Structure formats: C-alpha cells, structure tokens
Image: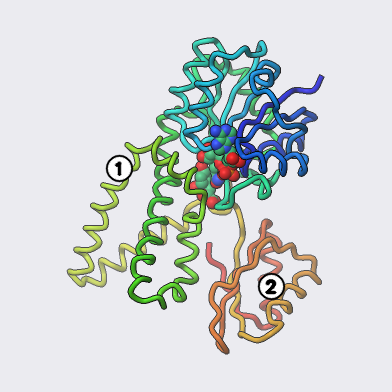
Amino acid sequence: MKKRILLIGVGLIGGSIALAIRRKHDVHLVGFDTNKEQEKIANTMNVIDEVAMNLREEVAKADVIIFASPVEHVCTWIEEIASYTFKEGVIVTDVGSTKGKIMTCASKLTERGIAFIGGHPMAGSHKSGVASAKAHLFENAFYLLTPSSSTTAENVETMKQLLDGTGAHFIVMSAEQHDELTGLVSHFPHLIAASLVQQIRSYAQEDELITRLAAGGFRDITRIASSNPEMWRDIMKQNTDNMVLFLKQWIGEMQEVCAMLEEGDGEKVLTYFEEAKVYRDSLPVRKKGAIPSFYDIYVDVVDRPGEIATITALLAKHEVNLINIRILEMREGVMGVLRLSFQEENDCERAKQLLQEHTYDVTTVS
Ligand SMILES: NC(=O)c1ccc[n+]([C@@H]2O[C@H](COP(=O)([O-])OP(=O)(O)OC[C@H]3O[C@@H](n4cnc5c(N)ncnc54)[C@H](O)[C@@H]3O)[C@@H](O)[C@H]2O)c1
Ligand SMILES: O=C(O)C(=O)C[C@]1(C(=O)O)C=C[C@@H](O)C=C1
C-alpha cells in the first residue's frame, strides 16, 4: 500500500518537497491550502494527487503530515489537530524557517506520543506559490532537523529516507541552535535587505532618479526583500529575541564604522573591507550550503542589438547549459555587464573559455 502524505500549505516549499518526494517514492499525496487557487494549481501540476476535503479524516489516514504554511499558521494548525485521531506510527514534520516556537507548540503532539520532527530546508527563493515549485530546489542545500523528545532515531531515518529525493544534506540540531544560526545567516540579512529598500524608498520622494540608479549591486543585495512579506512577518515574530540582539550588535558595529569614516583613516577602512572580502571569499559558496551552488561569470558586452543572442547561441552551439542570465548594467551605447549562471562548474569553465576565445572580457567572482 502506498504511503499517504498529507501536505498542509501547498506553496513554493510544500510543492517543492512534494515533487522531491515523488522523485524517489510512489506515494499518495493529499494537499490542503487555505488558498483554493493554490490547491487547484497543485492538482493540475500533479504536485498532489488530491485535495483534502475533510482534514480531520485525512489526518486520521496519513502516514506522514507535513506543514508548509507560514510559521505562525504551523503553530495554529498543530494546536488545532492536537485533539484529532492519528494513525499508529504517524510522523509529523514542518518546513518552517523557525523552530523554537514550533517545537514548543508541538509538545501538544509529543505529549500524546506522536513523533514530531521539526524540519527546515535551507534553500528557497523570493518567489511564492506552487507554480514556482521545483523538485530540485533543495539539491545540495542543508536540511535542518530538530527532533522532539518523542522522536526515535528510527523516525529520523524514516524521515530522511522519505526526503532523499531532495538531494539535501541533513543536519540534526536543537531548536535553540537552529534559531540562532538561521537568525544570523537568513533572518537578519532579510531585515537588512528590507531596510535598504526602505531607505531608497524615502530618498525617492525627493529625487526619483535614485530608482533608476539602484541597479547591479543594490538589486543583488536586496533580492530577498521581494520575498513573501507574510512569511517574513511570521519569522520575525517567532525569532524576535535573536533579531533584537543581532540588530543591537549591528547598530554597535555601524557606529564603529561611522567613527572610522569620520576619522578618515584610509588604512583602517581598507582593512575593514579586506577582512570582509577574505572571509566572504572563504565561505563555501561552491560547496553545499545556504547559498545556492551556482557558478557565475560576468561578461562585458557592448550595447548593440543581438549581442545577448550571439552569446547564448555560442553557448548553445557547444552544449553549455546556462541556467540564468541577467543584465546587470546596460547604459545606452556603452558597455554593459551580463551575469551568466551555471549549475555545473565545468559548464561555467567551458563558457568562460569559449567567450574569451571570442574576445569577450570575462570575470569570475567567487
Ligand atoms: N521561501 C523560502 O525561501 C523558504 C525556504 C525554507 C522554508 N520556508 C518556509 O516554508 C513555509 C512556506 O513558505 P513558502 O515560501 O512555500 O510560501 P508560499 O507563500 O509559497 O506558500 C505558503 C502556502 O501556505 C498557504 N497557507 C497560508 N496560511 C495557511 C493555513 N492557515 N493553512 C494552510 N495553508 C496556508 C498559502 O496559501 C500558501 O499557498 C514557511 O513556513 C517558510 O518559513 C520558506
Ligand atoms: O534564496 C532565497 O531567496 C532565500 O531567502 C532562501 C532562504 C535563505 O535565507 O537562505 C530564506 C528563508 C528560508 O528559511 C531558507 C532559505
């Protein structure tokens, strides 16, 4: 008999998890979402086999229950279903970006002996909705697991096996460690990205030109500010203490930077940037990690019709697999910069070689 999986919240991450499970397992997936349009799309895309009509009945039949809604709703749902009837041996998990509060709420299940394993696939996108779901979204990413007291090692193994199609690397940790670490590398940067956008927004009221100049670097550093605001409101709510702590530390750091600039000591400023560059360059971008493993090259191009087509045609002719292309800067009649992204390192190297052979100026930034 096929394993029955109940997915509550059929959006980008829920959908991607479902597709990843399907890669390796012949399961029956039942989906529930408060947004009926998402349910419909998920059904059409074969992300799920059917839409849940009666959630209480579906909970009773499920072998695995996965919560993939914004984190505050995960807690509400856990509390709601805590009094329901469950199938013997059921495993309940979630994909939420925070773990502390969810694990506390999950005690309502663990008290009943139900295995709850907190989960967080550390990859994603600023896009939302099941239409953007991809089976390979979590490939090579870390998948953090926070088992509860009622979870056995066997439960964790079962979970890992079910999720093996994600291609992710599992790390088991406490909810507290999870919220501190992801707070630093994911939640806090989101806050900073949003604040940078807000700063430009205020300036734009005085000089609208700023919006046209905010290209290249600004767009890169603020990409994540385009993510689902509801999801991020909930994350901030559940990791407030860490956010306030990191923000205070950061304000302290910025005050020091401010003093350094006022002092006008160029050597100190240089050291500050050098230290940051050396450390940033040493981060495992090309290995497994929270930062997606893409290989980028930057190509100087002349602003003339057909230039991008020439480059993509050259790569296609040599079967070099390009996964993303972005114009970072293009001024009328002058040189611009194209960023080409590759999933595979050898594609990246080959592209670099081909373009250089065709006299393009190519730069690699790790
Ligand atoms: N987006 C990312 O990069 C990312 C990465 C890892 C984990 N997460 C976590 O995954 C979860 C889902 O995020 P997403 O990016 O898939 O967002 P999403 O907006 O694409 O999907 C969330 C889905 O949950 C549904 N939903 C909202 N309230 C609900 C409720 N009460 N009951 C059932 N469904 C409900 C929404 O209609 C939506 O379809 C969040 O908890 C988030 O913290 C997100
Ligand atoms: O790539 C992005 O768009 C993300 O923001 C993904 C990201 C992250 O910060 O790395 C965002 C939140 C998740 O909980 C996990 C991954």
Q: Is mark 1 within 8 Å of ligand 2?
A: no
Determine whether, in the image, residue 120 is placed left or right of residue 90.
left
Ligand 1 is found in the corner quadrant, namely: top right
Would you place residue 90 above or below residue 254 in this image? above
Vertical relation: 126 (above or below) 153: below
> Which residue sits at x=26%, y=47%?
248
Q: Residue at x 33, y 74 (%)?
A: 206
Q: Nearer the viewer, mark 2 or mark 1?
A: 1
Which residue in the structure is indicated by mark 2? 353
Which disc is residue 314 wearing?
none
Which residue type carries mark 1? Answer: Val
Specify few, some or many for label 1: CA neighbours under 10 Å numbering under 14, 14-19, or 20 or more: few
Query: In the rendered structure, which amino acid carries the disc numbered 2?
Result: Gln
Residue at position x 36%, y 64% from top? 274
Kindly give the residue lying farthest to the bottom in the view shown.
333
- Residue 120 seen in render: no
Query: Which of pointers 2 and 1 lies earlier in the amino acid sequence?
Result: 1
Q: Position of residue 4 (x, y in %)?
A: 73, 23
How many circles with numbers are drawn on the protein? 2
What residue is shown with label 1? 244
The quadrant of the picture occupied by the N terminus is: top right
